[in-house]
Amino acid sequence: MKFICLVYAEPEALSRLSALEKAELDRDSLAYDNELEAAGHFLAASALQGVQTARSVRVRKGKPLIFDGPFAETKEVLCGFIFIEATDRDEALRIAQGIPMARHGTIEVRPELDIG
C-alpha cells in the first residue's frame, strides 16, 4: 500500500530554530529518506516553500476562484511530504514516527486512493 505522510508545523516553529538546529534537522531528514529508501519504503519526498507563496484554487459553477494562501483551520501549515510504501497502516504509522519533523510539528498519514 502507498501512504502520504503530510508534514505540518506552525510557520514560526522552524524560524525559532538556530542555524545549528536547522542544519541538524536537514541532515536528519535526508538521512531518514536514505534509510527509508534502503528499506524499500521511500517513494518521494519534498519540502515546500513558505505558506506566503501558497495559492488555493476552487472551481465553482465553472469559474476558477484563486485565493492567496491555504485556508486550513489550524495554526499548522503543510510544510512537505514523504510518499512511502508500507504493508499496512500500522507500518506506515511506525515509519511516520521516525520522520524528524515529527519533533517540531504533526505528520498526517493517509493511504493512497486507488482509482484504477
Image (cartoon, helix red, strand yellow):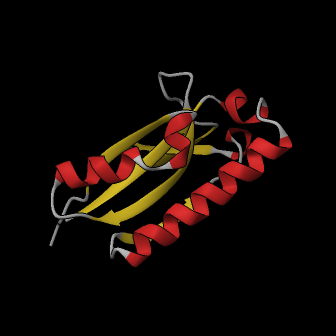
Q: Nearer the viewer, residue 81 or 33?
A: 33
Quarter the N terminus occupies: bottom left
> Which quadrant is home to the C terminus?
bottom left
Residue 52 to residue 34: above or below: above
Query: Residue 99, image x and y in percent?
Result: 47, 50
Q: Is residue 81 above or below residue 55?
A: below
From the viewer's perspective, tell me whether residue 3 is left or right of residue 79: left
Name the residue rendered at 50%, 66% in the picture: 33
User: Which residue: 18% across, 65% down?
Assistant: 114
Which image quarter: residue 79? top right
The answer to whether residue 16 of the structure is visible from this angle is yes
Q: Where in the figure is residue 90, as x and y percent of width and height?
A: 18, 48
Q: Is residue 103 left or right of residue 17?
A: left
Which image quadrant is residue 50 in?
top right
The answer to whether residue 47 is seen in the rendering is no
97 versus 36 height, above or below: above
